[in-house]
Amino acid sequence: MRKSFLFMVPVYCALLPNLYSRSVGSYQPATVIQVREYALPSTYIEDTGIGAPQLPDVYKYDIAIQLACDVYTGRYQSDKQELPPILAQRRTMEVRVGKRFLHVRVDHSHDIEMHIVRH
């Protein structure tokens, strides 16, 4: 029993970094399954516009991406109203998952980074 345990520990330690780097650090094929526009909750209290600051035009979208059996929702933020074509619904792409961010590969030199809001 002890010999098999001593054999299993080095094998496990050798395979664990490889499995972890394959799932977390590398790009994997994924599919966009839902796109929703995100609206900030209103903080407007009065009926008059006096004293209400004008918010900058920032467009936010929640993008649900299926990666194998997991679904991640990332928040895409832009000053343009239209989404990049890579983030269209039912579109396949390559995605790398970080601790707090999804990195969507647009081409070999450019990524789109989205904050993970749900997993």
Image (tube, helix red, strand yellow):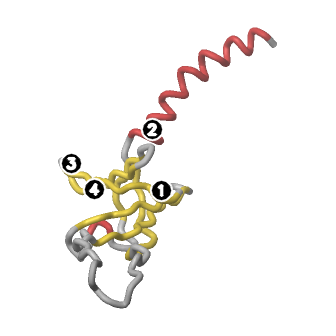
Q: Splitting the image into 4 quarters, where does residue 44 fall?
A: bottom left
Q: 39 or 31, which lies in front?
A: 39
Above or below, 24 relative to 39: above
Residue at the outermost right position: 1
Q: Earlier in the sequence, mark 3 or mark 1?
A: 1
State the SS at label 2: helix
Q: Quick one: label 2, few (<14), some, or many (20+) residues within 10 Å? A: few
Q: Earlier in the sequence, mark 2 or mark 1?
A: 2
The type of residue carrying mark 1 is Leu
Q: 22 or 116, which lies in front?
A: 116
Q: For the residues marked 2 and 3, what is the alpha-carbon distance in whole angstroms?
A: 19 Å
User: Could you tell whether 88 is left or right of 100 in the image?
Assistant: left
Q: Earlier in the sequence, mark 2 or mark 4?
A: 2
User: Could you tell whether 7 is left or right of 55 in the image?
Assistant: right
Q: Earlier in the sequence, mark 2 or mark 3?
A: 2
Callout in the foreground (2, 4): 4
The type of residue carrying mark 2 is Arg
What residue is drawn where x is 26% and y is 73%?
Answer: 55
C-beta proximity under 8 Å, tags 3 and 4: no
Q: Which mark is residue 112?
A: 4
Give how far across and how far down residue 82 sits, in percent: 24, 76
Q: 69 or 45, which lies in front?
A: 45
Count the marks: 4
State the SS at label 3: loop
In this figure, which residue is indicated by the disc labeled 3? Answer: 108
Above or below, 100 relative to 36: above
What residue is drawn where x is 25% and y is 66%?
Answer: 78
Q: For the residues marked 3 and 1, what is the alpha-carbon distance in whole angstroms?
A: 20 Å
Above or below, 35 relative to 13: below
The type of residue carrying mark 3 is His
State the SS at label 1: strand
